[in-house]
């Protein structure tokens, strides 16, 4: 199978199917309860967090160090993979969930509130 | 703008642009350092985790309760939104990162190892 | 029972017994598996983390705001309570564990390494 | 200095002083902002969590495996050390914070509620 190369060409279903295949081929479904996947997400997130612990790493440094960029990208991918695994398991339509949550967020954080010099609350 | 409705129709670029617009309109870029976004991801993940704490919630229960399903979907969407925010900020091509990490994962967890009755290591 | 008032007067056993009593009186032992307690610790830690999200809160600000100080103290206490619950459950002698880990830490991070102008590794 | 050996003999001040000495000797105070310590706590907690990921480890197994018990104890000690570091930094009297939070918890979770066959809410 040809891998897509750009985020503009890759729909979510592609990721869902790739992750599902990977999990099924290894008989991991039995381990992938929602609780376990949430736990795994936390562990992957901490591995990403650890890269930055006690360090001042800004975006320029990341973009100038291919090794650092790859380490971070790998951890981000791990988080994404477990997140996809979770939505696969729960049959969540991520596009729907995203669209609905963005509507709620727009109501919760009205644009005007953050364009009048006021303090950023969240 | 018409919202896409199915994961099969929605490419990653759509999510990236939606999140970028939301963040820019609220002048939040200055808060969205990598460290802060990782911290925010952890907080959203904990809100998802809390739904399951001290409870035996299985997938059938989730699919039979629209309210529970929506709560979980909302938290999953929040995690996804911050993850997209992070890859926007770091200019990570998520398709590339995913593809490369999946190759590493296939080497690290060979299919045969998990189809011979052996214990699941990860 | 008279509550102790200073950390200099309070031995760990006091906290262990108080927490054990609290848990037993509510029949919570059945919920307090190691995994669940670790999950609960993560949730409490995130509540502490959220106080600081997207904010520049320094130590002076905390010490000058009784409300902020109490909020932070409450979250810290919650983390401590779940940690005590976990060591109760696992029969860990925390004094022993602490002493042994401090010995390992002294070997791993020799004093000289951090007093010669070198970069702080952890 | 003679190390105390039992939790019944060890007051909190002992741990606070030991951790403070360790941190000061390595010039780490500058790294130990509240946010960084909270981040470090999350990473240590994940290391503890990882021991249990995708595994059914019960208390009996932990008590029968000295190696497993030591691994878990080490991670618990790391969490405790960073927690002590945080209360040192913030000048929190942990005995006070604990006592006050336990009073709140007793009001929030009345004993009767959990001794009448009702469902456990938290």
Image: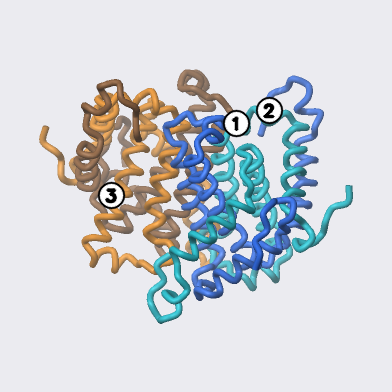
Chain colours: A cyan, B blue, C orange, D brown
Chain where mark 2 sits:
B
Residue at position x 64%, y 47% in the image: A93
Task: Tell me if residue C106 can be seen.
Answer: no
In this rendering, does residue D34 appear at all? yes
Give coordinates of residue A13: x percent, y percent.
74, 48
SS at circle 1: loop
Query: Where does the image place residue C92, in percent across and percent down from the top left?
Result: 39, 29
Q: Chain of mark 1?
A: D
Write down the residue under mark 3: C74
Name the chain letter of the residue that bears numbered label 3: C
Residue lying farthest bottom? A116
Report crowding for label 3: few under 14, some 14 to 19, many 20 or more residues within 10 A (C-alpha). Answer: many
Q: CA distance from mark 1 to mark 2?
A: 8 Å
**Where D64 sits versus C73, above or below?**
above
User: Looking at the image, which residue is at 75% across and 31% down?
Assistant: A26
Q: Which percent across, then down, holds residue D75?
A: 48, 39
Q: Please identify the quadrant where the N terminus of chain C is shown.
A: top left
Q: CA distance from mark 3 to mark 2?
A: 40 Å
Q: Are marks 1 and 2 in contact (CB under 8 Å)?
A: yes
Instruction: Give the left or right position of residue A106, taking residue B105 as reference.
Output: left
- In this view, the residue in front, C115 or B29, is B29
The lab-note entry on whether marks 1 and 2 share a chain reads: no
Q: Which residue is mark 2?
A: B120
**Could you tell me which secondary element the residue under label 2 belongs to?**
loop
Whole-number angstrom distance, CA of label 1 to CA of label 3: 32 Å
Q: Which mark is residue D54?
A: 1
């Amino acid at each position: 199978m040809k891998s897509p190369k750009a985020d503009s060409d890759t729909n979510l279903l592609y990721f869902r199917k790739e992750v599902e295949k990977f999990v099924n081929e290894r008989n991991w479904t039995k381990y992938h309860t929602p609780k376990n996947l949430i736990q795994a997400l936390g562990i992957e997130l901490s591995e990403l967090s650890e890269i930055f612990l006690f360090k001042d790493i800004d975006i320029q440094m990341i973009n100038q160090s291919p090794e650092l960029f790859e380490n971070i990208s790998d951890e981000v991918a791990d988080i994404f993979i477990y997140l996809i695994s979770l939505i696969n398991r729960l049959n969540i339509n991520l596009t729907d969930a995203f669209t609905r949550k963005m509507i709620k967020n727009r109501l919760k954080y009205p644009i005007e509130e953050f364009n009048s010099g006021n303090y950023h609350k969240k």
